[in-house]
Image (tube, helix red, strand yellow):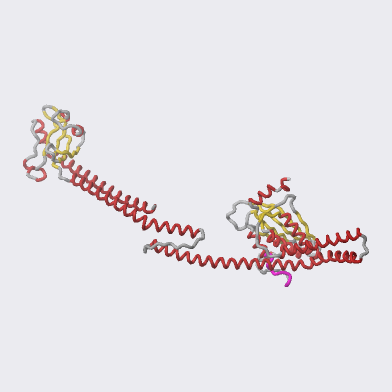
Amino acid sequence: MRLAAKLVLLFLTGLLLVVGLFAFLTVRQEQRAQAEHQQFASELVQSLQPTIDRAIQDNRVLEIPTLMQRSPRFQQVTMRWVEVSAINDSDQQPSPLNLIIAEQKTTVLSMPDQSGNQVVYTYVPFTSKGPDGIKAGKIEVAVPDDGMNPKFQHSLMTSLIALTGVASLSGFVILVGGVHMVGKPLNQLIDKVRRVGEGDFTGPVQIESADELGRLGNALNEMCGQLRKQHHELEMATREKIKTVEQLRHAERLTTVGRMAAGLAHEIGTPLNVVTGRAELLASGQLDPEATRVSAQAIQSEAQKITRIVRELLDFARQNTPQRSTQNLNELITTTRELMETVATKHHTNLYLSLPETPSSANIDAGQIQQVLTNLIINAIQSAGNNGNVTITLTDTERKPPGNSEYDTNHLYRTIIIADDGDGISAEDREHIFEPFFTTKDVGEGTGLGLSISHGIVQEHGGWIEVESSEGHGSAFSIHLPITPNTSQANRNDPAETA
């Protein structure tokens, strides 16, 4: 509808320009005709100035000389003297003719005479000097209208009527045709494009016309068919990719479980020895009731300890569906540290925590972030080695994400730093540590997927991992997790923090 209105407006604008040009030319032609009458009358009065002067002084009627009357141009020309002082007399023409005569310049007026014939009157200023004094007035040169002025007026009026009719008819045709031939197809195309933008590729456009809009509709239908096919293929590929990534993450998690097995065997072995010894005492039947109660409590306590260790190991090894929620990072780091304590003990490495007093929360998948922490802590323990130190620090930092031009200011992040005092990483290796299957460990000690998977998990959470390391001075891996409005609100409402 808007396009049709624009077409009508454009067409009417063109017609208006044509009418305006025609009117301008008509006015110019009228002005040119008046100029010709002025020039003719001025030249006539100038050529007959002595004769006119004598006729005025003798109070005779002004006449065209006989020789000039033989020329067809002067046959119908008449002249008369109009004195300025007598313009208000009854025998003179009424206003506005009296005003025209009183002017001090040559003027032209087209009006009908007493017989109703159209006559062009030209008034040329003339001053006569004689014995009776100076007489000021104008010479009226009357020439029958040659019909040019009415002709132009009639032509102009006819053109205006014709153009108005054409404009009305064309506007109606364009408006009706534009609505049915342009407006409706365009509305269908716009609706289709809007649905495509929303991801709906169904419902082809039905445009039966064979013009450009019909071709555009067919092309849009073909494009939607291709997009629907590609969208399906992309969904399948994405599902396969997600499935593969989850399998790799689960495999890496199981590898980590394998590394923890030796330490866990020791952790479970000690409680089992206690349980066995207490059970033998109970089986001997030599204990009094109090000693029996104490042994039973010891067996219960050690069994619960074994159950907790096995449950934590199974929870870590289990393949769960990713699910984010607001989690307390203090508790998550503490739990992970307890899980890694056996690995640290096996390598004779000291494991330290540096956590804030108030809880720090983030919107994360706890299992995935625990896998990241476990991978980095195991790497730090292996790097620190015998009598080495590994420190896990949780703090808030204001940082700008690397390589992201959309952020022009710093933002607040939860930052977990896992630092060790081991051998460090060379500059050459730092460029490749997040690449899949890249590892500096011996065969059988690592798959080369731990850091790559950890890097992907943190990126999916909207954060990133930074590495600071130099050979001989240890390494520090910083995990930056964004603070969402939900987690900020959770911190404000946390009783532990407000206390």
Q: Quadrant of the C terminus?
A: top right
Q: Is residue 113 magenta?
A: no
- Residue 465, image quadrant: bottom right
Q: Residue furthest top?
A: 132
> In the rendered view, does 268 fall on the left or right side of 197?
right
Q: Residue at x 11, y 29 (%)?
A: 130
Give whichever of 277, 457 is nearer the camera. 277
- What segment carries the magenta color? 443-451
- Residue 273, image quadrant: bottom right
Residue 486: percent from left, percent from top: 64, 51
| Residue 444 visible at all | yes
| Residue 423 visible at all | no
Residue 83: percent from left, percent from top: 15, 31
Residue 132: percent from left, percent from top: 11, 27
The prevailing secondary structure element of the residues shown in magenta is loop
> In the rendered view, does 350 fall on the left or right side of 368?
right
Q: Is residue 445 magenta?
A: yes
Q: Is residue 40 above or below residue 363?
A: above
Give whichever of 329, 78 is nearer the camera. 329
